[in-house]
Image (spheres, grey):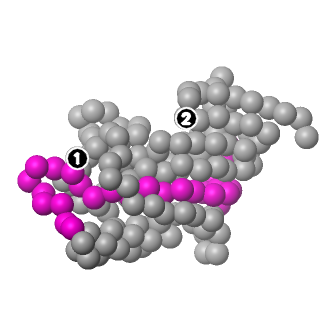
Amino acid sequence: MQERTHRASSNKHIHNDIYYFSGTGSNDGYSKEDHVLVTDPFEKHVTRTMEALKKSIESAGCTMDSIIHLEVFLCLPLADNIPMPTGRARFDAHKVQYDALNKIYGTYFSPGRAPSRACMALEWIPGDSLIEIVGSARVVAQSPSPVGE
């Protein structure tokens, strides 16, 4: 196999026909005027993140079904007007997010084609996002403008 490396930025590159990406959140690819806030519904964060992910991987010549592995990070909203749950209520709040994630997440893949995934709860994610995704995907088509060129 011929080694190929393209680099667009510090968080996305193709190496040996595998696209590696990180830092995909709910405001990626959207103008500042169209950013979601931590106070917006979690489902909106998930949908926008999955749409940004889809656009990113397709621009690199991948498909949602060619994703190999994802790591999904979730956090609860940190805002002055939203009390942070503690104890069991905090666990329950993360479980509600996890269940909402799964309902939306599954719609982005062909039946039986969802990639391996790890999901973790964090204290904070940059960029006013309540979700961030990192992962890798097989390049299955020549992209019109390869990442990094």
Instruction: State whether residue 100 appears in this view.
Output: no
Q: Residue at x 43, y 50 (%)?
A: 132
Please report the bounds of the magenta region as a residue range: 61-86
**Dividing the image into 4 quarters, which one contains the N terminus?**
top right
The local secondary structure at tag 1 comes to: loop
Q: Residue at x 56, y 29 (%)?
A: 10
**Dividing the image into 4 quarters, which one contains the C terminus?**
top right
Q: Is residue 111 above or below residue 22?
A: below
Sort mark 2 into few (<14), some (14-19) or many (20+) by Cα contacts within 10 Å: few
Q: Residue 86: horizontal and vertical position, in percent?
A: 21, 67
- Please tell me how many numbered marks the rendered image carries: 2
The local secondary structure at tag 2 comes to: loop
Q: Residue 143: horizontal and vertical position, in percent?
A: 68, 37
Sort mark 1 into few (<14), some (14-19) or many (20+) by Cα contacts within 10 Å: some
Q: Is residue 67 above or below residue 95?
A: above
Residue that carries the numbered disc 1 in the rendered image:
37
Three-letter amino acid code at disc 2? Asn
Residue 59 vs residue 125: left or right? right
Q: Residue furthest top?
A: 149
Instruction: State whether residue 26 appears in this view.
Output: yes
The answer to which of marks 1 and 2 sits earlier in the sequence is 2
Q: Residue furthest front?
A: 87
Say whether residue 92 is magenta: no
Judging depth in this view, the residue of 107 and 125 nearest the camera is 125
Residue that carries the numbered disc 2 in the rendered image:
11
Three-letter amino acid code at disc 1? Leu
Determine the CA span between mark 1 and mark 2: 23 Å
Q: Residue 34: horizontal and vertical position, in percent?
A: 26, 39
Q: Residue at x 59, y 35 (%)?
A: 12
Residue 20 vs residue 130: left or right? right
Q: Residue at x 48, y 57 (%)?
A: 72
